[in-house]
Image (cartoon, rainbow, N blue to C red):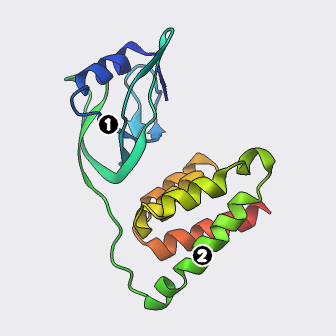
């Protein structure tokens, strides 16, 4: 992420001792000027270091978990803040759907890696590498985040609290692209 707006530079200073913040897509309003309203489901991200390049501060955020934005605060800081709680998957009700998850994950991985040379370059190695470091819920969210789909579809996948449902929807969305 390239950070250059004064309000976000201030945010980076404010969180220097705990480099975590939430990223959430805008549901309505303008991004600049404080009138934007975010979707209530976002991602808690962490970053290791800030790389300064001219007027930009570059950070590489790593998603840590989904969160629900409870109370928004537009007054206390020059940037939007919110109180958040963890937002995880609910237990799957259908054991058959859970048994199909490896098949669904493999299909998504195959479909993503054949999207085209520009889109697929190195993505298989990245996905295979993170697969071993993540639980099934977070890996499915990572896979969905790698898909080249309109942002609102990605938001809906992020909001889904059922891993089998999320995977089925991701497959359906990918099949519609063909």
> Foreground: 49 or 70?
49
Q: Please rate how many residues cluster around mark 1, counting C-alpha atoms within 10 Å: few if below 14, some from 14 to 19, many from 20.
A: some
Q: Which residue is mark 1?
A: 21
Judge whether residue 97 can be spotted in this image: yes
- The total of numbered circles placed on residues is 2
Element at label 1: strand
SS class, disc 2? helix
- State the residue at coordinates (36%, 17%): 9
Q: Which residue is mark 2?
A: 104
Look at the image and tell me in which quarter the C terminus lies: bottom right
Q: Nearer the viewer, residue 172 or 126?
A: 126
Above or below, 134 relative to 37: below
**Which quadrant of the view contains residue 175?**
bottom right
Q: Residue at x 21, y 29 (%)?
A: 17
Q: Position of residue 138 (x, y in %)?
A: 42, 61
> Residue at the location (77% across, 59% down)?
114
N-terminal-most mark, 2 or 1: 1
């Amino acid at each position: 992420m390239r950070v250059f707006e004064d309000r976000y530079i201030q945010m980076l200073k404010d969180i220097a001792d705990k480099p975590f913040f939430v990223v959430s897509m805008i549901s309505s309003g303008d991004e600049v000027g404080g009138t934007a309203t975010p979707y209530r489901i976002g991602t808690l991200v962490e970053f290791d270091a800030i790389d300064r390049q001219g007027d930009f501060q570059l950070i590489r955020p790593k998603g840590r978990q989904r969160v629900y934005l409870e109370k928004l605060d537009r007054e206390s800081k020059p940037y939007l803040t919110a109180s958040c709680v963890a937002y995880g998957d609910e237990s799957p009700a259908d054991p058959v759907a859970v048994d199909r998850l490896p098949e669904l994950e493999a299909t998504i991985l195959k479909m993503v890696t054949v999207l085209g040379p520009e889109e697929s370059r190195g993505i298989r190695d990245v996905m295979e590498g993170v697969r071993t470091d993540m639980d099934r819920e977070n890996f499915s969210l990572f896979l969905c985040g790698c898909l080249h789909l309109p942002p609102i579809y990605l938001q809906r996948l992020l909001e889904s609290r059922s891993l089998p449902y999320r995977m089925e929807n991701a497959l359906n969305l990918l099949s519609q692209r063909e």
